């Protein structure tokens, strides 16, 4: 009887231990990795969020959701692609879903206080107007073209763009030819 | 304007934006946020399971009271339909389809579309997998017994059970109206909520695939 109760007790302890293992605690390695990923990628994430963030969903909200999804997906990063590709995929998927309003619940959370956005005053930008034209012209493109052009502007190769979008490299090249033409025509018309 | 110039404008646009992050605080908030989201899901699971248990236990007790009468068959059909209902809802949850945000954009869109098509199918066919089985089980319970006073059942069941033709008719019409409304509202949800989104996703996937 005593042996039976001992076995049951041991079994329960092992069972709970295995259950706790399944919870995948957030390790210190993952913490450092997350911090590093954010530091290296925050500017480019925000650049993309500025294109997709349209009122009432501000780029800042979108940025936070991307950062949250990166943190959440970190445990499933297996290194099959580069960290950059992985970050771009999450960023564009989150941005696209928000634009399609597929995530009705995701953006209900309050703004996280751990992120602060500041406009540095000593850095006057004469190019603001030209950026605005660029943004307006990108807004005239369809969803698929928008995702491709932002990656192109990020100076990614066709191979990387193909890996992020799920298209073939040739297909990206063909598409880019047309998108680039459309974009230049639009910008030139605005700057004339 | 040249390509490089465009890329420079794009890159320089973010230079005046300074983003500072307190990762410690951020992770704390993320954890709280995630726990809250998970808690909502957990609460919903508990709600569904406890409702199912209460419903099944209640109907099973009733089945014992009416042992070996046609009511028992009706109760078994209703319980089966109810369990199938819960199973369908759980197996078609969003989390099973669309959580992998690190996959290529096209794949993510296809996953979204698959999820939405499942949802639409579920809503459009609610008549066959939920309404009809529950309705027929319930009708068997209502129309199979005409002499409830001869059964040894609790006084509450005796009181609630429609024993004469008029009561049975009224009860049936009310249930029929409710299930018809349920079918209509589900079909409307498929048409209004999901169809435009599926069309939009189809459009984006087509935009991605053309020019091959």
Image: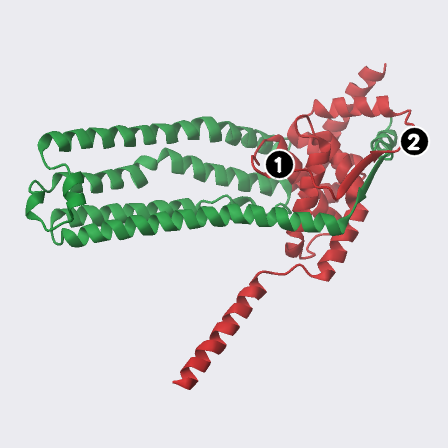
The answer to whether one can see residue A184 in this image is no
Q: Earlier in the sequence, mark 1 or mark 2?
A: 1
B80 relative to A117, above or below: below
Counting from the top left corner in percent of width and height, residue B110 is at: 55, 40
- What distance separates the C-alpha of mark 1 from that of mark 2? 31 Å
Q: Colour of chain A?
A: red
Q: Quadrant of residue A60?
A: top right
The residue to which callout 2 is attached is A123
Q: Chain of mark 1?
A: A
For the point 47% across and 48% down, the residue is: B43
Chain that is green in the image: B
Crowding near the residue tagged with mark 1, few <14, some 14–19, many ≥20 C-alpha atoms within 10 Å: some
Is residue A57 among the parts visible in the rendering?
yes
Instruction: Look at the image and tell me in which quarter the N terminus of chain B lies.
Output: top right
| Badge 2 element | loop
Residue A83 left/right relative to B95: right
Q: Secondary structure at mark 1?
A: helix
Give the residue at mark 1: A107
Q: Residue at x 39, y 50 (%)?
A: B49
> Label 2: chain?
A
Q: Badge 2: few (under 14), some or many (20 or more) residues near its Cα, within 10 Å?
A: few
A88 vs A147: above or below: below
Q: Position of residue A117 (x, y in %)?
A: 80, 36
Question: Which residue lies most toward the top here?
Answer: A192
In depth, the one of A32 and A91 nearer the eye is A32
For the C terminus of chain B, which image quadrant?
Answer: top right
**A71, B111: nearer the viewer:** A71
Relative side of A96 to B51, left or right: right
**What colour scheme does the image use?**
by chain
């Amino acid at each position: 009887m005593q042996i039976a109760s001992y076995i049951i007790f041991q079994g329960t302890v092992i069972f709970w231990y295995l259950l706790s293992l399944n919870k995948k605690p957030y390790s210190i390695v993952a913490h450092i990795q997350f911090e590093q990923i954010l530091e290296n990628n925050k500017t480019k994430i925000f650049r993309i969020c500025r294109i997709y963030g349209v009122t009432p969903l501000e780029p800042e909200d979108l940025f936070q959701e991307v950062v949250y999804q990166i943190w959440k997906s970190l445990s499933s990063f297996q290194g099959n692609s580069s960290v950059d590709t992985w970050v771009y995929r999450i960023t564009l998927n989150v941005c696209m879903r928000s634009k399609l309003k597929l995530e009705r619940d995701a953006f209900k959370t309050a703004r996280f206080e751990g992120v602060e956005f500041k406009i540095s005053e000593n850095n006057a930008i004469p190019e603001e107007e030209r950026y605005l034209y660029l943004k307006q012209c990108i807004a005239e493109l369809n969803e698929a073209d928008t995702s491709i052009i932002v990656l192109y502007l990020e100076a990614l190769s066709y191979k990387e763009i193909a890996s992020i979008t799920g298209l073939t490299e040739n297909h990206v090249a063909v598409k880019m030819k047309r998108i680039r033409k459309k974009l230049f025509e639009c910008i030139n018309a605005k700057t004339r | 304007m040249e390509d490089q110039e465009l890329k420079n404008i794009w890159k320089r646009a973010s230079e005046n934006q300074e983003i500072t992050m307190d990762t410690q605080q951020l992770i704390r908030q993320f954890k709280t946020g995630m726990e809250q989201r998970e808690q909502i899901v957990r609460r919903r699971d508990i709600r569904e399971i406890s409702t199912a248990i209460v419903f099944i236990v209640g109907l099973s007790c009733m089945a014992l009271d009416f042992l070996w009468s046609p009511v028992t068959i009706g109760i078994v059909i209703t319980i089966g339909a109810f369990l199938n209902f819960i199973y369908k809802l759980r197996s078609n949850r969003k989390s099973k389809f669309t959580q992998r945000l690190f996959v290529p954009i096209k794949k993510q869109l296809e996953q979204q579309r698959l999820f939405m098509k499942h949802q639409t199918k579920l809503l459009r066919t609610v008549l066959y997998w939920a309404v009809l089985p529950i309705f027929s089980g319930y009708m068997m319970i209502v129309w199979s017994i005409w002499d409830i006073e001869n059964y040894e059942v609790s006084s509450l069941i005796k009181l609630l059970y429609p024993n004469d033709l008029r009561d049975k008719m009224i009860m049936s019409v009310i249930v029929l109206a409710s299930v018809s409304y349920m079918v209509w509202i589900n079909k409307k949800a498929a048409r209004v909520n999901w169809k435009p989104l599926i069309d939009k996703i189809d459009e984006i996937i087509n935009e991605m695939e053309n020019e091959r």
